[in-house]
Image (cartoon, rainbow, N blue to C red):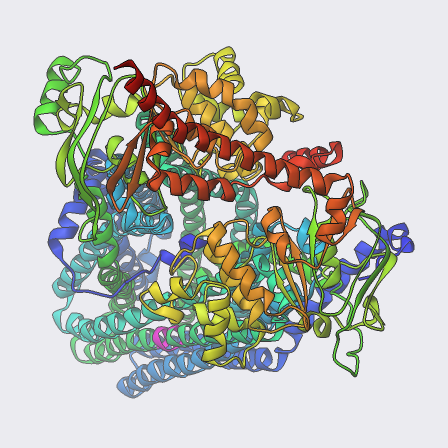
Amino acid sequence: MATTASDSADDDTGDRDRAAQGRRMVWDLIRGQRLRYAAAITAMAVGTTFLLSVPYLLKRATDAIARGDADLMHTVVWAAVGVVAFTAADGFFTYLRGRWAAQASEGAVRGLRHQLYSHLERLPCRYHDQADTGDLVQRCSSDVETVRVFLAAQVVEIARVSLLLAVAVPIMLSQDWRMSLLALCLVPVIVAMALLFFRKVRRLFEQVDESEGRLTTVLQENLTGIRVVRAFAQQDHEINKFLERNGEFRDLEYRLFIAMSNYWTTSDLLVFTQIGIVLVGGGFFVVQGQISPGTWVLFWWLLRTIIWPVRHIGRVLADSGKATVAIDRIGEVLAEPPESVEAVPAEPIGGAITIENLTFSYGNDRPALDGLSLNIAEGETVALLGPPGAGKSTLINLLVRLYDYEQGSIHVGPHELRTINRDALRDAFGVVLQDPFLYSKTVRENIVIGHTAASDAEVESSAHAADIHGNISGFADGYDTVVGERGVTLSGGQRQRLAIARALVKDPAFLVLDDSLSAVDTKTEARILRALARRHGNRTTILIAHRLSSTRLADRIFLLDQGRLVQAGTHDELMAVEGPYRRLWNLQGSLEDDLRHDLAEATSATPRRAVSEAQRT
Amino acid sequence: MSTAEWIDDDDAEQRVDLRLWRRLLVYTFRYRATTLRFLGVALMLAVSDISFPQLTGRLITAIQDDPRQVNLVAYGAAYMALSLVLCGSIWGFIACAGKVRTHVSADIRRDAFEQLQQLSFGFYDTRSVGWLMARLTSDCNRLSNILAWGVMDLVWGTTLMALVAVVMLVYNWQLALAVLASVPALFVVSVFFRKRILRTSRKVRKANSRLTAAYNEGIMGVRTTKVFVRQQENLDDFDRLANEMREYSVRNAVLSAVYLPIVLTLGSVSIALALAIGGHQVSVAGLGVGEVVMFMYFAQLFFGPVQDLSAWFAELQMAQASAERVLGLVDAVPDVQDSAEVARRLREKGDDGHPDHVGRIEFRSVGFRYREGPQVIEDFNLTVEPGQTVALVGATGGGKSTLVNLLCRFYEPTAGEIMIDGVEYRQRSLRWLQSQLGIVLQQPHLFSGTIRDNIRYGRLDASDGEVIDAARLTGAHEFISALPAGYDTEVGEGGNQLSLGEKQLISFARAVLKQPQLLVMDEATSSIDTETERQIQIGLARILSGRTSFVIAHRLSTIRAADLIVVIEAGKILEQGTHTELLSRRGHYYDLYTEQSLRDVVRIDTVLDSPAGRHAAATRASR
């Protein structure tokens, strides 16, 4: 993702294009399922026709009964059989519709999920730096769920109600136009009321959600901080805090229930009034002799079949507005440009690393690297030292192309880094990041992620080298122990060592340890350093360390500060000149002097006291 | 997110244990007035429900008999009146159920939460926060749904069905039987499908939470994924989950797509029977067309409750596990609590009958093990005079933190006793001991809110001045006042806007503000940089002087100053004495000390601590 100056100039139009592009991507996925949707809608149309023919059967039977026909039983029995058969037929098509609609919507959503996951993995680190994990996960889960509900339920419901009306209205009109008017007069009011109500009540829904969120936060904070609560004997305070939230949530939710009951009651009243109009109005027309009792029953039954779904459609329409928002939010993510893809070089990646005049900054402020130049020979072991913010980790990030630099150059062997395919480059590296991430998988799976074909022996030998084998063998399931929330929780030092094992098993051309020994004790550190020393000579190793002890292994030491190289050379060279490196060693030396002094005092104290006591006597 | 994972934890469907539900019903009956009101409403609703078919049937019959005699206005008025009663009942129904639903849910949650504040750490050790959260959120909602809507539907449904059956039987028993014939089949089919639908929907939920977890992991681990070129493998793993999700969702939808048509068809059988038999009776026994229509209406009316009740019945079986878990939580007995004797004294006198003073502390042959675990502490004897600072040193896993936990009575010794001023501490109230304590932990937990709020947590009635004094004393004031918002800086959830060292300083200030008689520091300054550490040494000396303190530390400077150093290994005391005494002994402490000094090698940051470096640290902190 090479950002150029011109990009920012038309950022605005770019954003708009991007939003449109994202929306298009989502719609494309949905459009891919249109055949299934068409089949579902066809099935629905056929089913609806059967369903709405039932009142017609009832009409014929009723008329026959009312007239007292001679072959009454013949008509009635056939009508009864017809009712069951038609309902069953409608049922069959309803089943087909349900199946196809589910396949269509779930298929589209599966595609959407796949697209999102794959895209998130390919988005550059710059994007992930500024993105909020919680928000992204929400887009991938809640927003996708909103789209899913839209596709699986709302679209289907809208189609169903449209079909119900499309079939029912002609049937009604074919019977009697005045009755039709009577039967449908309140329908627009019912739909409009639902639409308005759910638009208006949306705020209340949100308030309830927010209140629940606050309640959950109080709960979570209390439970994670339970030790602090106890330590400060603040149970009463915590209970009060909780009760306040609990009561607030309860009251808001209750308010929502009351609002809902107001709506349902009003809307039910409208529905019953509509049915009553048909009943009484129909009765009037029957009395007038304008329609038969059968027609009357037909209208009454038909209306009762369609009125409940129609009443519901207002809510569906109001809710489906959320889908547009969700699609836009998903589209925003999908429209972000992923990392660029370059060609894979023919020969394996390796050789010396040459960095020239490298300048890089994460944001607009202070550069993280400021004209840095250094080179690392093939097979060399180097240590990078420097205070936080010196640019050590940044250099590593650039080396594996987690970020792209604009100024200066890095060459690995003969190639300029920016021309090398990222994946191919990263394959050549074994990086232990500062805060290593472990997947919630087994220990073995975590170790082999960089080298899936690794044998058990290789896994174990790298675990030995990282001095983690002992810990792993101590777990109940050994290498098959699952780590993470659902499994064993590892300490910081164990996680670091597991990450080292994971990098070692790759046997990479370049091994990078970014402050990876900070949480292990001196003895373990020494053992790991010894194991690393075996790589010495043929593989390049870059160590970032805060402890001086880690640098003992290095051929050369680079001291960085403020993104610049301050000192470079072997240990002996650096000790020979006045500078930060020597100061560092001297400080450690003075500490050891202190120690010696303490010891001397303590050990000499006893004999001296003994002597003086002896003298006194 | 993580909560979702625990929702359906070990949710095997079980036989309904009525005792459990009777216990829970108590929650519903707490709202006696609402419950009574509801009974009235349910009855009214059922009565108006069955009046509609009768009114409709009668109108049709009347018109059939003699169209000119029919008073349509009267019928219309009656119909509207009935509609009003019905809708009023519906309003009452939802309002009552809503009231019980929200209040019962809040009550169960409150009881569980209050219980959680009493339960000892032994309880927390075996349960994750996510698991507990799921009990208080989804389980509570589920149960209160059953206790409100389920119970109300049950009352309304059975009343309505009974009324419909009675009215039909009174009108015409043959027709009635014809209509009722398909009911048993309908019930069986409904329970069968409802259960399966619930089961698959649970699978859908599980698959969904796995998907969310996968997204979460994918985003959190994106650097590792990139560095190890795992995109394709991760995507393959993800696709497996997504396919599983699709499969379950489709299966769930198909089950519903089969179930509903069957219900409707069974319903149509009843209607058809009413029609056919009714038609037959019209021709032979002079039954009116109105009655036939009325019976078809009755048939329809009958199905609603059957479907609802079968759904609740299935849900009851599924929610059995939720009920057990929640009641298990509410009824759990804390391992550590005031004895009956202490509770009695607290009730009668307001205190536990001992002076409010922490004097000499004695561990007498104290032993401890976690449940069935190995012996962590064995025959531990130690006497600490008031005002002494005790440093506990030794390798990790030696039992230092356990000792401190025992001292704070977060756990109680499984053998021996701990005396405070000559009184066994189980003879004293838990609340008293814990209000004398100030504790600073290695992993300090901050609550969301400002820095000021967090320090004040130590003593809620402390003034702003006292808060700042405490921060000064612990060396936190400096970095806090460097922040743009100072003491009003929001620390973020769990304090994640601050570095670990900064959080340690705040939690230190919080403990100091409490002015405890007994101070416990468990690796409390481990992540504070050398520079700051040097600054807080003076403050620390003042804090520790004249206050009994237990310190677990690896910094030499802190240990060296202690009045008493206790070297612990495998739950036993190896050596104890002052710094010089122990060094001269050339024993375990000497070994530890020499090794530690190497481990404590100065970090490079301190030497190269340039202004720029400091600036970087400050901007990082303010982020």
Horizontal relation, residue A408 to residue A199: left or right: right
Horizontal relation, residue B536 to residue B127: left or right: right
Please state, as top left, top right, bottom left or bottom right, where the N terminus of chain A lies in the image: bottom right
Q: Position of residue A557 (x, y in %)?
A: 72, 53
Horizontal relation, residue B323 to residue B478: left or right: left
Residue B344: in magenta span: no
Q: Position of residue B490 (x, y in %)?
A: 57, 30
Q: Residue at x 79, y 59 (%)?
A: A404
Q: Quadrant of residue B236?
A: bottom right
Total label count? 0
- The rendered magenta stretch, by its main secondary structure, is classed as helix
Above or below A543: residue B191: below
Q: Residue at x 57, y 69 (%)?
A: A504
Q: Position of residue B453 (x, y in %)?
A: 49, 24
Viewer-side residue, B214 vs A562: A562
Horizontal relation, residue A514 to residue A202: left or right: right
Residue B54 visible within the image: yes
Q: Position of residue A540 (x, y in %)?
A: 69, 67
Please state, as top left, top right, bottom left or bottom right, where the C terminus of chain A lies in the image: top left
Above or below A443: residue B413: above
Residue B65 visible within the image: no
Viewer-side residue, B73 vs B245: B245
Which region shows up in magenta? B256-261
Q: Quadrant of residue B115?
A: top left
Above or below B17: residue B279: below
Q: Residue at x 19, y 77 (%)?
A: B281
Viewer-side residue, B247 vs B49: B247
